[in-house]
Amino acid sequence: MLDQKIAQDVIFQGLSLGADFCDIFIEKNFVDSIAINSSKVKDIKSGVDFGIGIRLIFGTQSLYGYTNSARKEDLLELTKTLGAQYNKKIDNIPSLSFKTFNPTLINAVSNLEKPTEYKVSKLLELNDLTRKQSNLIEQVNINLLQRRQEVEVFDSEGLHMNDIRPYCRISSSAIAKDGTEQASGSWNPGVRGGYQFVEDLDFNWIADYTAKKAVTVLKAKPCPAGKMPVVIDNGFGGVIFHEACGHSLETTAVEKKASVFWDKKGEMIAHEALSAVDDGTIDNLWGSLSCDDEGMQTQKTQLIKNGKLENFLCDRLGHIKTGHPRTGSARRESYKYAPASRMRNTFIEAGPHSLEELLSSMGDGLYAKSMGGGSVNPGTGEFNFSVEEGYMVKNGKIQEAVKGATLIGRGEEIMKDISMVGNNLDFAAGICGSVSGGVPVTVGQPAVKVDQILVGGNA
Amino acid sequence: MRQEVLDKMNDLISYAKDAGADECDVISSKGESLSLSAQNGAIDKFNVAGSSSIGIRVIKDNKVGLSYTESMDVDALKFAAKKAVENSVCVGESPFESIKLENKQNLKEKKINNPTSLEEKKEFTLALEADVKKRDSRIQTVPYNGLSERTVEKYYLNSKNTHTFQNDHYYSCYTSALINDGKKSSMNYHSSIAKTFNDLDKNNCVDQSYQHALNWLDATSVETGRYNVIFTPDSFEELFGCFGGVFSGKAAMEKNNPFEEKVGKIVGHKELIITDSPRFKEAFSEYYFDDEGFDQEDLCLLDKGELKTFYHNTKTASFFNLNTTARAARGSKSALGVSGTNIVIHSGSTEESNLLKDKYIEIHSMQGLHSGAKFMSGDFSFAASGYLKENGQVLRPIKGITVAGNFYNMLKNIAQIGNIQHGSTHRSFFTPLIKFSDMSVAG
C-alpha cells in the first residue's frame, strides 16, 4: 500500500532525529454491514478506512502519530513533529533495505461471493425463524458485519510485512415481551473469515437459542444476593478469566506495576487445577492473526500451567520496559492507536470433569449458563461481570431461572477459588476494549466451579 | 481549509446525483489531537493525530443507502457515492425518511486560540504523576495519567442547499493513584475537562484520585440487605446513561424501547422533571443545531413524572406523525439516529440537609456498567464503591459491594428529590441529590 521508497525516507528521518526504533503501520479497512429490524432491512452501510501510523521509540518513550494521508511530505512532516520532542540530530544513518517477512498463514473461513440481495434474504430467513419460536417474541434485531483489514508494516530493523485479515460476524437478538416486562436473548458468533461462515450456521439452532433465552430471562425471578458457589459454563463464560486475570497479564499493565501479578512470574497464582493459554494461531478463530501489528508471527503463549504463572503477553515496548519476551501480541483497533500488548484467543484449558460432576459437587449455589461482559481494574484485580442466563442449584440439581446477577471479586482470589475444571471447552467471540482500542478476541473455557464468589442481585 | 472540505462534499453530492440519487446529504468530520502521558518522571507517550472522514446518505426511489470513506481523492469519493446508491437498492422503501431542510446556512465557528506552549503541557503532564506520588509513600504507581488537547470540526451539507458547520476545541486531563500497603491495594482516578488550558483543574484531579484511593484502602463491604442509596452526580450520570435510550424516538420506532407506548403516561415520581437543554448556562458544551440542520431548543422529556416526548429526527417524527424535536444525530460513518444534549433534572422540594439525615450509602464509583445493565427490562447490578453516611458525614468507606435494582421502577419510587442542583464533573448532566430507599445491596 505504501511505496517502499517513501517508507525508507520516513524511517530514515525518524532515525536521523535520534529515534532508537521507528515503525510505520498502514491500514486499509473495507467494511460492509446489513442491519435487520422489524422484519425489514434497517440499513446497509459500506465504508473504507485508510490511515498510516508512525511510531518513534526513544529509550522507553513512545511517540505516535497518525494521518489519513499517504503523501511523502505529510508523512515526513508528521515524523518531524514527533522527533522534534527530542531535538536530536544523528548523522551517518546507514541505508535501509527491507526484507519481506512471510509469516505462516493462519487459516480463515473462505469468503463466498454472494450478492447483497442474497445476504438480505438469508438474514430475513433467520428473522422469520426466530419469530416463529414463541408468541412472546416481539422484536428481532440481526446485524451482519463483514470486514477486510489490509495491513502493512515497515520498521527500522528492515522488516516489511503484509497481512490480510478477513472478519465476519453475525449478531442476532430476540426480544420477548409479556405485558410491561421485556427481556432479550442474543447470540453473536464471529470468525476470522468470510461469508461462508454464515452459510454454515444452523439458523434453526440460533433461532431456538435466542428466543428460548429471551423467554427464560423474561420469566426469571430476581437472583438472590450474597456469597455462594458458582458453576460458570463454557464458551463466553471464559470472560471470567479474560477479566479477572488476562488483562493483568498484559505488559501494558505489568510495565506500570499496575497489575496484581506484575512480580509473580514463576509463582502459583491460581488453583493447581487451572491451566490457561492465549493462542493467536488457531485456524478460523475470531482473535487469530498470522502476524501481530508489529509484524511478528503470532504464537501460542502458555500463561498459567497447573496454577503457576508462566508468561506475560508482551509487545515491543513491553519488552523494552520489562525484559519479558515478545509474544506476537501487539494489537490495535486501527491506525489511530499505537500497538499495545493485548489478548487474542484466551482460554482455560479443558479439565477432567463433566458439567454434572461440577454441579453435583457444588450442592447449593448458582449455575451461570451464559455470561454477559465484564471489566477489571488490573491495578487492584477487582473485576465484575454479569450473568445473562442463570439458574439456582439445590442439592446439585438445576432449579428455577434467575436474572440480574453480577459476579464480583478480585482476580488473585478467584483464580485460587476455581477448584474444578470441566471437559467441555468451547469458545466465543467478543470485542475487547483497552488502551489500543477495541480488538476482536475470543474467550473460552470449559465449565468451571468457583468455590465462593459474591453474587450481586436481590438482597 | 473549510472551503476545501466543502468542495469535497459538493463533489460527493454531484457524484451521487450522477449515480442516480434523488437526494443526498453529506457529513464530514475532521479532528486533530495531541496527547501526553508520564511515567516515572518522564513523558512516556506523546501522540499527535489528524484525521478526517466523509459520509454520504442517499435517497433513491424512497430507499436509503449509506457509505463513507477516509480517502478524499476523486476515485474514493466516486466509489463512496456509487456504493451508497448500490446499497439503497437492497433496502426496503422508507416512506418516513427524507431530506427536508432547504436553503439554510448555520455556521458556528469558534476562534481557536492556543497560547500554551508544548513545554507547559509537558510540565503539566509530569505534575499529574508527580503531585500524586508526593502525597503518600504507599503510592505504588500512578498508572494512568495524561493530558489531551482536541480540535473537532463537523460539516453538514445537503442537496437542498443547507449547510451547517460547528467546531470546538478543548482540553482534558486525568490522573490516578494506586496505593498498596503490602497487603491491600486500592485505586481511583479523576478527570477534568476545560475550554482553556488554564481552566484544567489539576489539583482537584490529584486530590480526588488520592483521597478516595486512600479512603478505600481499608474499606470493607456491608452486610447484604436493603439500604437507602444516594448516587453522586457523576455516578448517577453513569447510571442514567445506561438507560437514557428510553428517550430515543428511533428505539421507539424500532420497538427497542421499553417506553415505546408510554408518552403521556406517568413513568416517574411526581416531582421528577427532566429537560434536555442544548445551551444550559452551566454546561460545558453548547448545541445549536442537529445533524439535519434544524435549530435546537430546550426539550421537556419528563414533566412531573409524565413522559412528554422522545428525541426525534425528521424520520422518527414522521413515523409518529409529529414534528421533529431537532435531535437528529449522524456521524460520517453512521446512519441517521437521535441523541440528546445536556440532561437537566430539576430540583425537588426536599431540603438537601433533610435528604441526607438518615443513614444511607453514597455510591461514588461503579464498575461493569456496559454489561450489568439490561436496557429492555431496566434491571441492573453493578459492582460499587462509596461511603456509608449519616447526616452527610462519612461513617466509613465501603467497597466490594454490588448495588442492584430496576431503573424504571426507581424513577417511580424515588424517596426524595433534593432542592439543590449539582453538575457532574464533565458538566453535561445536572441533578439534585436523589434518595432511593430500599435498594438491594450485597456485600
Image (tube, helix red, strand yellow):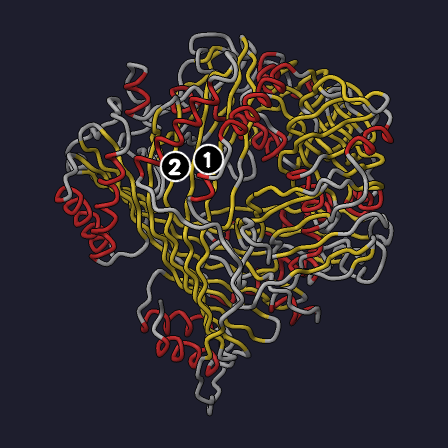
Q: Residue at x 32, y 51 (%)?
A: B53
Q: Look at mark 2 in the image and give the residue it sits on.
A: B286
Report if the CB atoms under discs 2 and 1 are less than 8 Å apart.
yes
Mark carried by residue B283: 1
Q: Quadrant of residue B260?
A: top left
Answer few, some or many: residues within 10 Å of disc 2's Cα (few below 14, many 20 plus, some between 14 and 19). some
Q: Residue at x 80, y 23 (%)?
A: A393
Q: Residue A203 vs residue A416: left or right?
A: left
Observer-nearest of B326 and A23: A23
Instruction: Give the alpha-carbon distance from disc 2 to disc 1, as whole Å.
Output: 7 Å
Observer-nearest of A12 and A448: A448
Q: Amino acid at mark 2?
A: Glu
| Residue A432 higher or lower than A387, as above or below | below
Q: Is residue B302 visible?
A: yes
Position of the N terminus of chain A by quadrant: bottom left
Find residue A78 and report its horizontal and vertical position in percent.
40, 69
Find residue B303 and report its horizontal and vertical position in percent.
46, 13
| Residue A317 higher or lower than A241, as above or below | below
| Residue B194 higher or lower than A22, as above or below | above
Q: Is residue B115 visible?
A: no
Observer-nearest of A270 and A82: A270
Chain identity of mark 1: B
Position of the C terminus of chain A by quadrant: top right
Q: How many marks?
A: 2
For label 2, the SS is loop
Chain identity of mark 2: B
For label 1, the SS is loop
Answer few, some or many: residues within 10 Å of disc 1's Cα (few below 14, many 20 plus, some between 14 and 19). many
Is disc 1 on the same chain as disc 2? yes
Q: Residue at x 74, y 27 (%)?
A: A456
Q: Amino acid at mark 1?
A: Ala
Q: Residue at x 37, y 76 (%)?
A: A4
